[in-house]
Amino acid sequence: MEQILDVIGSYVADAFETAGYDAKLGKVTISNRPDLCEYQCNGAMAGAKQYHKAPLEIAENVANVLDGCDAFESVDAVRPGFLNLKLSAEFLAGYLAEMAADERLGVPEADTPKKIIIDYGGANVAKPLHVGHLRSAVIGESVKRILHFLGNETIGDVHLGDWGLQMGLIITELRLRKPDLPYFDESYEGEYPEEAPFTISELEEIYPAASAKSKEDEEYKKAALEATNQLQQGRRGYHALWEHILNVSVADLKKNYDSLNVFFELWKKESDAQPYIPPLVEYLKKEGYAHLDQGALVVDVAEESDTKKIPPCMILKSDGASLYNTTDLATIVMRMENWKPDDIIYVVDKRQDLYFTQVFRCARKTKLVNEDTGLYFLGFGTMNGKDGKPFKTRQGGVMRLENLIADINEEMYTKIMENHETDPEEARETARIVALSAIKYGDLSNQASKDYIFDVDKFTSFEGNTGPYLLYTMVRIKSILRRYMEETGRSAEEIAALKLLPAAGESEKALALALTGFAPAVLLAGAELAPHKICGYIYELANQFNRFYHETKIMSEEKEAQRDSYIALLSLTLRVMECGISLLGFTAPEKM
Ligand code: ARG
């Protein structure tokens, strides 16, 4: 269905033409003076030069033509030449009816859908998820859902870190603790046990212990590096151990991501890109892209217009070892070969900005991607505590994601139980849903690139710009709709067919206008990869709804057609909010 701005714009453009001016001047925007009007057109000012006329005169000519147009309640030509427009309630009701009849609530699908890989999550195997990984998961999931809803084919790839020193550290520590395991016996030729020689809790204890030791003990560190190296060279026993680590760890990661409503289409790992490295190195050398610099193989990526120094992209260290960016380049090759994406979007900590500049430039220069392949870095800021420093536990340690979620769940549970008597089990489930909205909305409502303060009290509040406030509003609508269904015996389908009357009051019209803003908000969020645009929109919609709700007697309205129209408006509001929060990656409970 057509965007409301386009519909209004075409009326105004026609009027310009009828009045003898260029139709192109009839561009309409949302008013930046909402106290005066709802929409505005500044075309008369632009036309003044072209037609050697006072802008006000042009505006008046156009206003005269629009006088009879029933889309508008008023069209005012005002100094120095603005057209101030207010929509008629009939037109608005008609537009909302169309929106309600559209499954997609008026949001258009892309004309040329793209295939887009979103690289997000980025957890490291065997290391517990910490709050730093939260942002990537939350933002990436939302961006993916938005792009998907806009008609693109989206592929989320968790791109697990499974190829680094952490593997060597774990192997080294295990070897110390359980030297008799067959994995360490180089002469062992039999099958290795199917069962992992550790549980996830052991694994999570082993890694930090090993990591701490390696910082103090040079020998230990050397052993870990050597183990990493041997693993990467394909030592059989280490490879088998690595598989155990992976399986145990991935099962746990899936559980964690599930609880965040975060789902990946691909569970690719850094190790999956390794086979692509030797041919890549060969190619870079053969084509003359790479050269040796003090023994290391590098590709220059500096450009003349650079204002700061962009160092070369290192492909191999002087000892022949590959690096984090070699893996990323090889991953690009793997993705281009297997999925041929139009775009790849990386949702990673913004401190990796320079790094991705190097990787992208290198991939382009060496033609690993097509000329028109989009490579985007969506860098996010740090999640800080109230003290403005990176978020920590009360004891000052690294906060684990699981614990953070558990804390917020508990906080929500207490609030819900305080609010009203409910079955504790039901309250637990509701708390889980509301807590997730608190965490995700708290994050997503900020522009991704900015640091933000994770303020538990604020985020879990039922008032203000928070997830729970949105859910509370939705639950309020749901409960009215339930009452309506009980009282009238009507079904959800019958509610969907109710007729919307033109808005009678001011707050009702404001709500109707707010509803028409859904499609533009989603389109903007998609174009700018900016979930916070959707947050801002839904928050505004919730405010408009609550204003309307407080000023209107809905269920006690005596005229049946009027009451039914209110219900239709509520049901549309709920659908828009539901769609909006699903794009953010959370849901609403039935009660709270
Ligand atoms: N595992 C990395 C980390 O924890 C993030 C990976 C980001 N994605 C990428 N393609 N490099 O820092």
Image (cartoon, helix red, strand yellow):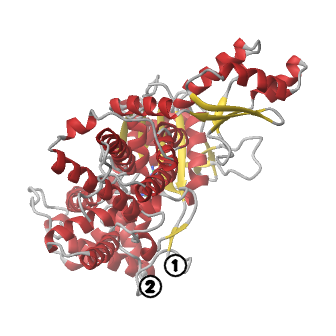
Ligand 1 located in image quadrant? bottom left
Query: Which residue does the image show at 56% across and 45% down from the upper left?
Result: 359
- Tell me if mark 2 has few (under 14), some (14-19) or many (20+) residues whose alpha carbon lies within 10 angstroms of its own: few
- Tell me if mark 1 has few (under 14), some (14-19) or many (20+) residues whose alpha carbon lies within 10 angstroms of its own: some
In the image shown, does 108 or 394 lie closer to the viewer? 108
Quadrant location of residue 128?
Answer: bottom left
User: Residue 104: x, y in percent?
Assistant: 36, 33
In the image shown, does 200 or 418 lie closer to the viewer? 418
Residue that mark 1 sits on = 386
Residue that mark 2 sits on = 396
Labels 1, 2: front one: 1
SS of the residue at dot 1? loop
Kind of residue indicated by mark 2: Gly
Please indicate, yes or no, whether residue 124 appears anywhere in the rendered image.
Answer: no
Residue farthest to the front, as pictured: 558
Query: Which residue does the image show at 36% across and 72% down from the upper left?
Result: 223
In the image shown, does 142 or 85 lie closer to the viewer? 85
User: Residue 429: x, y in percent?
Assistant: 20, 65
